[in-house]
Amino acid sequence: MKNFIKIFSELVKIKITLFVTVTTGFGYIASRGVIDAEIILVLIGVLLLAFGSAALNHYQEKDFDVIMDRTKSRPIPSGRISAVNALIISLILIITGSLILITSYEILVVSLGLLNLLWYNFIYTYLKRSTPFAIIPGSLVGAIPPIIGWIAAGGTLLEPQIIIISFFFFIWQIPHFWLLLLVLDKDYLQAGFPTLTQIFTKKQLSRITFIWISSTAVTGLMIPLFGLVTDFWIAVGLFACSLWLTWKAFSLLVDSDDYSVFRYNFRYINYFALSVVILVSFDRLIL
């Protein structure tokens, strides 16, 4: 049983899919301002869809995973689960998640969930094999989950508040993906994926990434302007977090012989996104 849980958690990329669920819950809280029973089904539905999407991605990339040092120990290439079984599990998860959403909420909710899956598994997954800039259109997968939560809570698609939230996660996703790919550059080259290091020098990449991280910080600062934050100290907290992220990102402008600076900034930008979620949620729920 313990071995099955370990294999399953790897197959569904538990850390990534849990964060997708967190941002869905964030959209719900931002819309309704409370945590009630209705949030449960949208979180479960989105989580199962995300699980299915991740498992399907393992199946799609099995031939590449076996080549890369980082991924060759994943469930399929390591032989701990067959490719067919992984595909069956992914389909069961996708169907179950879709049924939960379609029977509990309006059709737009499940439509957005399936759009996110299609975009990740059938556009971004294949696009990244042909261009190192696939992360830009691929970042849409980070923008959709909070919209799902917002609409499930009774919000509408074109309200300014959800647009800025979605835009924040879209912008954040680009340096998030970019920094990860830069850290794993050698693995991706080994598997034949096009990488940014084939186009830019390390100094150029550092400067470009600094701009993206700074843009993420600025976008986070815009959230209070859309009425999602009413407490002065929460706004101050967001400002402080944005300054901290920008300050940390200055390390990218210092010349270095290794890529450790990208690894550290990958952590910092994730901490920043989580801080924004916590601060805004606290304002909506308590203050």
Image (cartoon, helix red, strand yellow):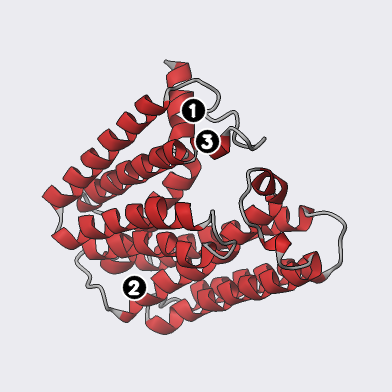
> Is 35 left, or right, of 26 in this rendering?
left
Q: In this view, does 159 lie above or below 69?
A: below
Please give the name of the residue rendered at 34% of the width and 73% of the height, measured from the top-left corner: 162
Residue nearest the observer in this picture, 151 or 281? 151
Please give the name of the residue rendered at 57% of the width and 78% of the height, measured from the top-left corner: 218
Amino acid type, callout 2: Ile
| Label 1: which secondary element | loop
Report the Cα–Cα distance between label 2 and label 3: 38 Å
Please give the name of the residue rendered at 28% of the width and 65% of the height, measured from the top-left corner: 150
Extreme-top residue of the structure = 1
- Mark 1 residue crowding within 10 angstroms, few (<14) / some (14–19) / many (20+): many
Q: Please name which of the two marks, 2 or 3, marks the residue nearer to the observer.
A: 3
Quarter of the image for the N terminus: give it: top left
Residue 85 image-quadrant placement: top left
Report the Cα–Cα distance between label 3 and label 1: 9 Å
Residue nearest the observer in this picture, 270 or 95? 95
Residue 63, which numbered label? 3
Q: Please name which of the two marks, 3 or 1, marks the residue nearer to the observer.
A: 3
Q: In this view, does 18 lie above or below 275?
A: above
- Mark 2 residue crowding within 10 angstroms, few (<14) / some (14–19) / many (20+): many
Residue 54 image-quadrant placement: top left
Amino acid type, callout 1: Ile
The residue beneath circle 1 is 76
Residue contact at pointers 2 and 1, CB within 8 angstroms: no
Question: Whole-percent x and y of residue 284?
Answer: 36, 67
Residue 162, which numbered label? 2
- One can see residue 267 in this view: no
Question: Whole-percent x and y of residue 287?
Answer: 38, 69
Circle nearer the N terminus (3, 1):
3
Please give the name of the residue rendered at 22% of the width and 40% of the height, measured from the top-left corner: 95
